[in-house]
Image (cartoon, helix red, strand yellow):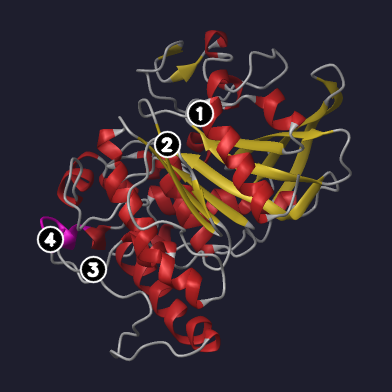
């Protein structure tokens, strides 16, 4: 693999000498680069945005938890652009730490509970129970194995999730109906608001709500995601310091993987299949994976010094587990420089052998997915970094 850039080296070639210089000079350089060249510009919080709680039920899972459903009205109106947050908080904790992540098929897919509203937005018709890109009742609970809600709640954590398609549908022309329609001035330009940028923006709007909810510890919100939603979680964590921790599960190219480690998905392929995920500017790097002067470790460096966990699956080939590990290794010097515990290993660990500092990595056995084992590691990593038993 060719040499990758030193995250502590400024654009002028000098090396960062102090924490102040990191936050005042190097970090802004990196944020500007990834905003203008990769994920696109992101708008501020909408001026007229408001929240409507449509359900507040404190007796779900036999009294274990409270479930809320919250409409986030971006334009302040019931008929305008909006998304729905599904939030579970444990009843025995005054204000709980929260896992916040996007889901693939609608909030109703997370649990088979009939009280969860079914999304009315576009859903991929390849999904079981989706007809003409609309979710039906048969999609209820189809992703419940990926979201072991009771287990998470019993461990003292809440869960908040949003259907990514509420924010921006995941297809090439989705920007014509998603939140990008609210910002036409950001679209006809090379650093346009991408779908990935829109998803990260939506996670920040969820954070706006979570800051107002007394059942949530807003200093301990963990933004997380799997696969493409893991990419969005990383970018959300990079752009919004309010997220106390970031977890990337098998995020691959455009996430934790280094492009310089050319394996499976490269820049040209991801831009061909998913051009909407990135800004138009990003396409200038097609076929230049080994010569680009940057890589994803620089984006992950924006998360430091907050805890960051990079998770892989041994058989998740398209996400390149070794490339993800190399990404974690490459960002480790930043954590060390900022006085946090860097990645405690330099060689790829055996499967199911987690290595945790403030920066962590593990490679689960099995295929590309999210399993209870993954959630157990997420909880262990959070407990370790927040000194929680």
Residue at 45% of width from left, 39% of height from top?
353
| Discs 1, 2 touching: Cβ within 8 Å | yes
Q: Is residue 37 visible?
A: yes
Viewer-side label of 4, 1: 4
The earlier-in-sequence mark between 3 and 1 is 3
Proximity of marks 3 and 4: CB atoms separated by less than 8 Å: no
Give the alpha-carbon distance from disc 4 to disc 1, as whole Å: 36 Å
Q: Are marks 4 and 2 in contact (CB under 8 Å)?
A: no
Binning the other alpha carbons within 10 Å of mark 1 as few (below 14), some (14 to 19) or many (20 upward) gives many
Number of other residues with Cα within 10 Å of mark 2, as a class: few under 14, some 14 to 19, many 20 or more: many
Callout 3: 10 Å neighbours few (<14), some, many (20+)?
Answer: many
Q: Which residue is mark 2?
A: 169
| Callout 3 secondary element | loop
- Left or right for 315, reference 243: left
Q: Position of residue 341 (x, y in %)?
A: 54, 65
The Cα–Cα distance between marks 4 and 2, rounded to whole angstroms, is 29 Å
Q: Earlier in the sequence, mark 4 or mark 2?
A: 2
Which numbered tag is attached to residue 4? Answer: 3
**Which region shows up in magenta?**
283-290
Q: CA distance from mark 3 to mark 2?
A: 34 Å
Q: Earlier in the sequence, mark 3 or mark 4?
A: 3
> Nearest the camera: 241 or 179?
241
Q: Which badge, 4 or 1, comes first in the chain's sequence?
A: 1
Q: Name the residue tied to disc 1.
A: 121
Quarter of the image where the N terminus is located: bottom left
Q: Is residue 6 above or below residue 288?
A: below
Q: Which mark is residue 288?
A: 4
- With 334 as the anchor, is 67 left or right in this view? right
Q: Are marks 4 and 1 in contact (CB under 8 Å)?
A: no
Q: Which quadrant of the figure contains the C terminus? A: top right
Q: Nearer the viewer, mark 3 or mark 2?
A: 3
């Amino acid at each position: 693999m060719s040499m990758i850039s030193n995250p502590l080296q400024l654009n002028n070639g000098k090396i960062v000498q102090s924490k102040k210089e990191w936050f005042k000079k190097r970090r802004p350089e990196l944020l500007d680069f990834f905003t203008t060249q990769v994920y696109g510009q992101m708008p501020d919080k909408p001026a007229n945005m408001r929240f409507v709680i449509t359900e507040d039920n404190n007796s779900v899972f036999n009294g274990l938890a409270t479930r809320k459903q919250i409409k986030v009205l971006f334009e302040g109106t019931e008929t305008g652009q909006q998304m729905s947050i599904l939030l579970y908080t444990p009843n025995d904790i005054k204000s709980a730490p929260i896992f916040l992540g996007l889901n693939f098929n609608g909030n109703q897919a997370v649990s088979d509970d009939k009280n969860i509203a079914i999304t009315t937005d576009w859903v991929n018709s390849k999904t079981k129970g989706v007809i003409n890109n609309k979710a039906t009742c048969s999609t209820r609970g189809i992703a419940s194995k990926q979201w072991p809600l009771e287990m998470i709640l019993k461990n003292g954590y809440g869960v908040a999730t949003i259907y990514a398609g509420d924010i921006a549908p995941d297809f090439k022309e989705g920007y014509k109906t998603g939140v990008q329609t609210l910002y036409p001035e950001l679209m006809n330009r090379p650093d346009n608001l991408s779908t990935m940028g829109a998803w990260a923006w939506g996670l920040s709007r969820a954070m706006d709500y979570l800051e107002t909810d007394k059942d949530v510890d807003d200093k301990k919100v963990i933004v997380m995601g799997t696969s493409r939603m893991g990419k969005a979680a990383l970018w959300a964590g990079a752009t919004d310091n309010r997220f106390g921790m970031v977890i990337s599960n098998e995020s691959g190219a455009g996430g934790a993987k280094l492009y310089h480690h050319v394996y499976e998905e490269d820049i040209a392929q991801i831009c061909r299949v998913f051009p909407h995920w990135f800004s138009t500017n990003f396409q200038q790097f097609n076929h230049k994976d080994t010569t680009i002067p940057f890589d994803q470790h620089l984006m992950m460096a924006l998360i430091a010094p907050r805890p960051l966990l990079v998770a892989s699956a041994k058989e998740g080939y398209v996400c390149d587990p070794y490339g993800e590990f190399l990404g974690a290794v490459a960002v480790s010097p930043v954590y060390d420089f900022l006085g946090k515990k860097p990645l405690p290993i330099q060689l790829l660990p055996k499967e199911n052998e987690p290595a945790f500092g403030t920066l962590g990595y593990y490679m689960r056995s099995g295929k590309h997915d999210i399993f209870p084992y993954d959630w157990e590691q997420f909880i262990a990593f959070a407990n370790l970094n927040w000194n929680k038993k």
